[in-house]
Structures are given as C-alpha cells and as structure tokens.
C-alpha cells in the first residue's frame, strides 16, 4: 500500500453532471445542483462542507446545463475547483468518478453527491468521516443516515450495519435501518479496471462488499433528501427550525 493511501483525503469530487429528471420541471431550465434550498444552492452546501473540512481541491463534473453551472462555480473563491467535462456524454456516477480519477490524485478521495444536504449534529459529519477512515480495513467508508430520522426519503433503506460498521445491502423488499447519505471516502484502487462509458458507482460498492471492506458511519444530525420539487419546502422548514 502506498503512503498516500494511508492518509486522510485531501481531494473530493462533487457529482453534478446528472440530468435531475425527478426534479422536473425545475431542471428543464437549470441543472439540479443550482436548485436553491433556503436561498442557497445545493452545490454550495456541498462545497462549503468540503471547504470547512479542509479539502482544498474539489473536482466537479458537469454535463446538464454545464455552462450555467460553470458560471456559478467561477463566483466562488474556495475551495479550488477543477472541472471534469462530460458535455459529450453523461457517464453516470461511476463513469464520472473514473473519468475524474487523474484529477483526484493518488490517495483516497471523497465523493459527494451534489444534492446531499443535512443538519449537523454535535460535530461536523465530514470531519467525523475523515477521522473514522481506516484504509487498512476499508475500501469505502460511507456516511449513512438513519431511515427513522431522515426527511424527504420514502424508500426502504439501502443498508444494514453490523457492530463493527460493516455494511450489507438490503435484500428484496425488506426494510433496513440506513440510507446512503450521498458522501463517501474511497480508495482509488477501486476505480482501476472499471468499465468504459457510463456505469453506476454501485459497481465500486459491490467490489468493496465482495472484499468485506464496505463500511458505514452513522450521520450525526438529520439528513434532508431533496429528490423532488415538493421536498424543497420540507427541507427549508427543517433548516429554518434548526437555526432557531
């Protein structure tokens, strides 16, 4: 294992190239990362969290309304933003990470869905995630939110978690306690020898599961799932209440 793989992440990718179809009709005229919740764009929530955690360089992949998104990103001074251009073809989450890998360096990195927002608990969750990262036993460390306290999410959950923090996927129609909160730390080795073209980041997670090296950290606070237009108002109410 290289020395770089033993360190905490110093780079991140914000996945911002998706079409945002479930957010229609809003995303007919703008990319989903520029949708505002409480007067702040979704991508600014992500970039501010990363900057506050000490991540100096963030790759952002672009496709849908790419020019509009890039213009917004140019208004920011921090963190340093590098564009991974997917204008020619959207590559999905996994393909987007693979294309951006040369921009992310040789060490572990953070992947951050551009629509992932939450209300912090007692300590910042990104710092907790970075402190919990252990490449000796982990290929991926996910931030996972309790199904019972998440806002705007109506699914059956994604994972169960054992006492050591190892994650196991939901089977069939069962309900499991945790949902992926859209943020993870990954080893770059997982991205090597992956398919050409578009594919889901689930490819990486399944690789980690096969090696018994997919772990989770329970989010401290409240996760706000902003997947559809009607979820915006509920998320705004929660954010406002948390500041009272």
Image (tube, rainbow, N blue to C red):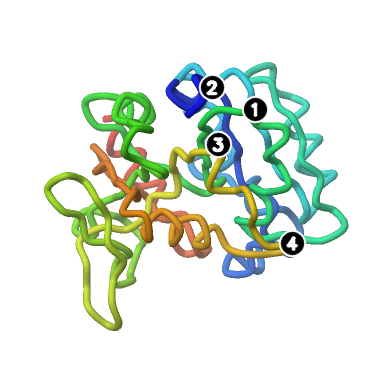
| Residue hosting label 1 | 105
Disc 2: CA contacts within 10 A as few (<14), some (14-19) or many (>=20): some
Mark nearer the N terminus (3 vs 4): 3
Residue at 43%, 23% (x, y): give it.
Answer: 6
Q: Whole-Å distance between the Cαs marked 1 and 2? A: 9 Å
| Residue hosting label 4 | 196
Outermost residue to the left: 163
Q: Nearer the viewer, residue 109 or 44?
A: 109
Q: In the displayed structure, does residue 130 sit left or right of residue 45?
A: left
Residue 140's spot in the image, x, y percent?
41, 44
120 relative to 165, above or below: above
Q: Whole-Å distance between the Cαs marked 3 and 2? A: 25 Å
Q: Whole-Å distance between the Cαs marked 4 and 2? A: 26 Å
Outermost residue to the bottom: 173
Instruction: Provide the secondary structure element on which disc 4 rests.
Output: loop
Please report contact status of discs 1 and 2: CB closer than 8 Å, yes or no: yes
Please report contact status of discs 3 and 4: CB closer than 8 Å, yes or no: no
Q: Nearer the viewer, mark 3 or mark 1?
A: 1
Please report contact status of discs 3 and 2: CB closer than 8 Å, yes or no: no
| Residue hosting label 3 | 40
Q: Whole-Å distance between the Cαs marked 3 and 4? A: 35 Å
Q: Whole-Å distance between the Cαs marked 3 and 1? A: 30 Å
Residue at 38%, 61% (x, y): give it.
Answer: 210
| Residue hosting label 2 | 10
Q: In the displayed structure, does residue 135 sit left or right of residue 1?
A: left
Mark nearer the N terminus (4 vs 1): 1
């Amino acid at each position: 294992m290289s020395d770089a793989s033993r360190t905490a992440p110093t780079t991140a990718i914000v996945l911002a190239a998706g079409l945002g179809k479930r957010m229609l009709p809003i995303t007919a005229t703008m990319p989903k990362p520029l949708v505002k919740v409480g007067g702040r764009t979704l991508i600014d929530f992500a970039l501010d969290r990363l900057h506050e955690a000490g991540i100096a360089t963030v790759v952002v992949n672009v496709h849908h309304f790419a020019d509009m998104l890039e213009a917004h990103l140019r208004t920011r001074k921090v963190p340093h933003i590098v564009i991974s251009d997917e204008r020619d073809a959207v590559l999905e989450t996994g393909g987007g990470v693979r294309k951006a890998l040369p921009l992310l360096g040789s060490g572990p990195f953070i992947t951050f869905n551009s629509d992932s927002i939450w209300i912090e608990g007692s300590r910042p969750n990104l710092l907790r995630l970075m402190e919990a990262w252990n490449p000796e036993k982990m290929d991926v460390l996910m931030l996972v939110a309790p199904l019972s306290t998440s806002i705007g999410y109506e699914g059956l959950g994604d994972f169960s978690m054992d006492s050591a923090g190892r994650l196991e996927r939901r089977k069939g129609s069962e309900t499991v306690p945790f949902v992926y909160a859209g943020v993870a730390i990954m080893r770059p080795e997982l991205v090597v020898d992956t398919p050409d073209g578009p594919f889901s980041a689930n490819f990486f997670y399944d690789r980690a599961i096969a090696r018994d090296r997919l772990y989770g950290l329970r989010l401290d606070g409240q996760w706000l799932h902003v997947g559809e237009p009607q979820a915006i108002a509920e998320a705004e109410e929660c954010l406002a209440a948390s500041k009272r």
